[in-house]
Amino acid sequence: MNAEPRRRRSSRRTQADKPDLLPQLPARMVRNPYPPMELLSADQVEAIHDASMRILEEFGIEVMNGRALDLFVRAGATVDRERQTVRLDREMVSETIATTPASFDLTPRNPERVVRLGGDRINFTLVAGPPNVHDCERGRRAGNMGDYRDLVRLAQHFNCITMLGNQVCAPMELPANNRHLDTYRANLVETDKSFHVSAIGRDRALDGIRMMAIARGISLDEMAKSPGVTTIISVNSPRRFDGEMAEGLMTMAEHGQPVCVTPFTLMGAMSPVTLAGALAQQNAEALFGIVLAQLVRPGTPVIYGAFTSNVDMRSGAPAFGTPENARANIASGQLARRYRLPYRTTPGSASNAADAQGAWETMMALWGAVLGHGNLIYHAAGWQEGGLTASYEKFVMDVEMIQHVTEFLKPITVDEDELALDALRRVPTGGHFFGDAHTLERYSTAFYQPLLSNWQNYESWQEAGGLDATRRATRVWKKALEEYEQPALDEAIREELDAYVVKRKEEIGGGEP
C-alpha cells in the first residue's frame, strides 16, 4: 500500500472512542505470573552447565577479531593467536557473568513505551532480517523500503508488539553499506518504540546508538546510563565468533547498550543431534559472548539468547515449531535463570505460507517460549518461510496468537463480584444469564474480542464472503494501515536525524544494492 500516513492527533484514538477500529488489547507491560515450566531436573541443569564449562575450558571458541583477543589475554584467558582460539576456565566465567544485571529497561524516544527485560516481563518483537516480503494480493517479492515502512507502521499500530527487531526486511534496492541508516530513520519516525540495531561491525551499531540518542534529545553518555536500543549477536555455531559480530558486540557494550548473544544451534547441523548436546553447546557459546561484553564494560546489560531447533534429517532444511524446538525453548529458560539473566527465545515456523502449518508451528514454539518464561520473544510477528520472508498475513495471525497468550496470562480474579452469587440467586433453575444485570454490566468486556477469528455460523459466514482466516488477515492489515497514525516527533529532531543520515551516507560513500 505504502500510503502516506496520517500524523497523530492530540490524543490517541481508542476502541471506546471509535468502535469501528480494529479490536485489540490495550497497551500494557505483560507479566507472566505463573511458575516457569521445568523440563530439566536440577541435576540435569548442572550436568549441562558442566558440559558447557568443559567446552569452554577444553575445546575453546574461535574469535576472528584481534581487539577481542587482546581483551581475553588481559583477562587471563588462554589465547592461541595463531588459531584465534580462546579457552576460559569456569571460575573466570562465573566471576565475570556475576556483574550482569538480572533485569534492565530500554527507553525509546517515547518514555511511555519503556521496555523492561527480565523477571516476569514478556516482550514481543516484529520479525527481523528477511530478504523477502509477501502478501496475498501482491505475492512474494524482494524486500524494499516501501514495505519496510508499512511493516513498522503495523508494529506501531498494534499494542502487543513491544519493540522492533533488526530490519523487518532488507530494502534490497538500497546500497547494502548504508541502508541501515534509512531503516533506523524509519524506525524512529514511523514508530516511537525501541528497536534492535544491526551489529555487523562497529559503524552500524554506533549509527543506531547515535540516532536513538538524537531522537531522545540526550547525549551518548546519558544513553550509556539509560539504554535505548539493543542488538542480536549471532554466533556462527559451532564455536565461532566472526570479526564483525565481535566488533558490534564490543561497540554496544562500550556505549552501555545491551547485547543479546544468540547461538544458532540447529540440532543435527550446527550442533549435536541430541537436545542435551545442543543445549550444552548453546550455553557455552552464549556465556562466552556474555563474558566478552562484561570484559568491555562490567555491568553492561546482556540477554541470554536461545535459538535451538532441529533440521529435517532427510533434506537438511531447518525446522521450527517442532516438539524439539518447544522443549528447547523451555529448557533454555532454565539455563538463563541459573545465571540470573534475561532470556530471549523465538516462536518460529518453517511454513512457506500463512496457513495452518504456520499457525500450529508458531503456537507450539510460542507456548514453549511462554512456559520457559522468555522475556524477549524475538521474531514474534510476521515470520514466514523459516525467516526468509516477512508476511503481512502471518503478522496478523501472529498478533492474534500473541493477544490470546497475553489475555491468558492475566491473573484470575476471585472476589465477591466475580463469584456472582447474587446473579446465581436471581436466575432460576434452568434459566439463562443473558439478561441478568451482572451480565449486562460486563458483556462488552467480559471476554477477549478476537482480531481475526470468526465465530459466525456457517450460513452467516458464507453470506459475508466465506473468507478463511488468511484472506480475513489481508483485510485486517489493510485496515490497520488505514488506521495508523504517525507518532508525533519534534520537527527539530526530525531535521537533525535527516542531517545525520545525509552526513553519514556521504562519509560511507555509495555501494551496490
Image (cartoon, rainbow, N blue to C red):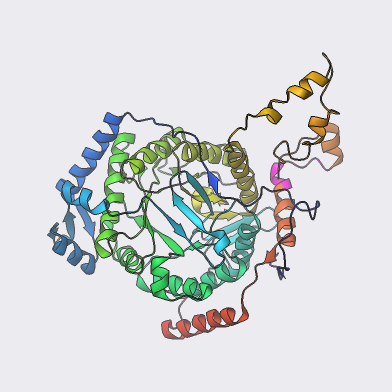
Question: What residue is at 22 percent from the left and 69 percent from the top?
Answer: 67
Q: Position of residue 305 (x, y in %)?
A: 38, 49
Q: Position of residue 46 (x, y in %)?
A: 25, 35
Q: Quadrant of residue 426?
A: top right
Q: Position of residue 52 (x, y in %)?
A: 24, 42
The quadrant of the image that shows the N terminus is bottom right
Identify the magenta region.
Answer: 465-472
Question: What residue is at 43 percent from the left and 61 percent from the top?
Answer: 230
Q: Is residue 470 magenta?
A: yes
Q: Is residue 421 above or below residue 325?
A: above
**Left or right: where 2 falls relative to 495:** right
Q: Quadrant of residue 251?
A: bottom left
Q: Is residue 153 above or below residue 353?
A: below
Q: Is residue 417 above or below residue 12?
A: above
Q: In the image shown, does 287 or 173 lie closer to the viewer?
A: 287
Q: Position of residue 219 (x, y in %)?
A: 43, 76
The answer to whether residue 87 shows anywhere in this view is: yes
Please give the count of numbered marks on the rendered protein: 0
The answer to whether residue 513 shows anywhere in this view is: no
Question: What residue is at 28 percent from the left and 64 percent from the top?
Answer: 297
Q: Is residue 93 magenta?
A: no
**Left or right: where 94 falls relative to 304:** left
